[in-house]
Image (cartoon, rainbow, N blue to C red):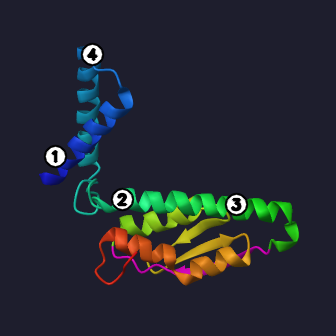
Amino acid sequence: MRYIISLTLVLAALWLAVSGVYKPLILMLGAGSVALVVWLSLRMEVVGVEHNPVLFSWRLPLYWLWLVWQIVVTNINVARLILSPGRIHPRMLSVPVPHKTAVAKVAYANSVTLTPGTVSLLLTEKELTVHALDIGSARELEAGTMAERIAWLEGSPTEQP
């Protein structure tokens, strides 16, 4: 029940923040939209411990800030590669996925894809296959910094940011 309540509250807050219109008719339509999404989520059986919208709690905004910084840094790296194409050495590699939950595994794969110069190709239970544009991007993934950040986001007690 707490997952339904947290999903409802998160959806309502998001809707209110995005809408910006607080007239009675619009508020009723928003409430109906939230109710429909919660009902559909229950029917699809995607409400539960792993799908809790507040699963990552206070850690998520901190991770987003770190990820935005990584996106900026890798954008600069890709711009340098474009200006000197001789440094481009594409490669495919597999990196381990040490995360416990499916949500953390998908967040890891999505984060890899969001950073320019790398694309997640295949996510399995234990590893992620990635295409990297250059050697530096491949080494960064192999170092496991992003995997450690996701483990921290997940709340794994052994990993630190």
Q: Residues within 10 Å of mark 2 (few under 14, many from 20)?
A: some
Q: What's the residue type where badge 4 is placed?
A: Lys
Residue 5: mark: 1
> Is residue 130 something that shows in the picture?
yes
Q: Which span of residues is magenta-colored?
A: 89-100
Instruction: Give yes or no for residue 31 being in the magenta stretch.
Output: no
Q: Quadrant of the C terminus?
A: bottom left
Distance between the alpha carbons at the discs numbered 3 and 2: 24 Å
Instruction: Using the image, determine if residue 18 lies above or below residue 152.
Output: above
Distance between the alpha carbons at the discs numbered 4 and 2: 31 Å
Q: Which residue is mark 3?
A: 76
Among the 4 quarters of the image, the one containing residue 101: bottom left
Mark 2 and mark 3 in contact (Cβ < 8 Å)? no
Mark 4 or 3: in front is 3
Q: Which residue is mark 4?
A: 23
Q: Which residue is mark 2?
A: 60
